[in-house]
Image (spheres, rainbow, N blue to C red):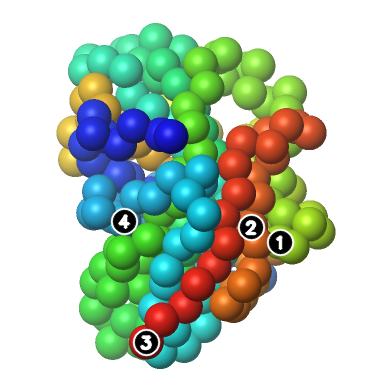
Amino acid sequence: MTNFNTIRNIYCVGRNYREHAAELGNDVPDKPMIFTKPTHALISMDAEHVTLPGDQGGIHYEGELVLHVGKSYTPGISVDEIIDQFALGIDFTLRDVQNEMKKKGQPWLPAKGFLGSAPITGFLPFPGAAALEQTDFQLLKNGESVQRGNIQNLIFNLQTIIDFIAVNFGLGEGDIIYTGTPEGVGPVQQGDRLELLWGDQSLGSITIKTEG
Ligand code: ZN
C-alpha cells in the first residue's frame, strides 16, 4: 500500500497538455495554472474500490504523472536534484460542477477536492527527467486504453512547474505534484475499472463505486 502519512501538499497543474486544453475548449495558459487538493482526497490505487459522489453530475478521470518532492526547494535546484520518486495518479473531476464554478468564477475545490478525488499508485524511484521522457503512461478503462501521455508533450516542463510552484506557494519535502492530463479524458460510472500503466507495467487499478 502507498504510505500517505508523509505526503504534505498536493499541487496539481491544469491544462498542461495542448490537446487536452483543446478538447475542453480552453485556451492554452501563458503561465502554469496551479490548484491544490486536500490530502484527504488521496486513495491508494491498490484499494479495491473508490467511492465517488453519484449525485453531482459527470465524473471525469484524468490520468497524470505525479512527482514526489524529496527535499526543500532552493533557487537553482534542478528537477533531478529535488524530485526523489514518481507515481501515476488520477485527478478525478466533477466536470459539471467545475463548469458551474468556472461560470460563477468560484474556486474549484468542490469539483477537484472531494473525498477519493486523488487515487495514486505506489511510488517508483525517480530516474531523472530525461529518462522519464522515454516512457509513455496510459490509463485503461475496463481494459481499453483511453489516455496515453508522455511528459515530452507538457506545455510547461517539470522544471518550470517546480520553480513556479516553489516561488509562488512554497515547495518542500513530502509535497507531490499532479503534472496535468493528456487528451482523452472522459466519464466514469459505477463498476468501471481504471488501471494505470507505466510503459507496459501496471502500477495499480481501482473500481468505481458511486454513492448519493
Ligand atoms: Zn488534472
Q: CA distance from mark 1 to mark 3?
A: 23 Å
Task: Check whether the beta carbons of the residues at disc 2 and disc 1 lie within 8 A of each other.
Answer: yes
- Which is more N-terminal, label 4 or label 1? 4
Question: In which quadrant will I find the C terminus?
Answer: bottom left
Q: CA distance from mark 3 to mark 4?
A: 17 Å
Q: Which residue is mark 4?
A: 41
- Which is more N-terminal, label 4 or label 2? 4
Disc marking residue 141: 1
State whether label 1 is within 8 Å of ligand 1. Answer: no
Instruction: Identify whether 41 is placed above or below 123.
Output: below
Callout 3, which amino acid? Gly
Instruction: Identify whether 42 is placed above or below 142.
Output: above
Residue density around tag 4, few if under 14, some if 14–19, many if 20 or more, within 10 Å: some
Q: Which residue is mark 2?
A: 194
Callout 1, which amino acid? Lys
Residue 100 vs residue 205: left or right?
Answer: left
Task: Check whether the beta carbons of the residues at disc 3 and disc 4 lie within 8 A of each other.
Answer: no
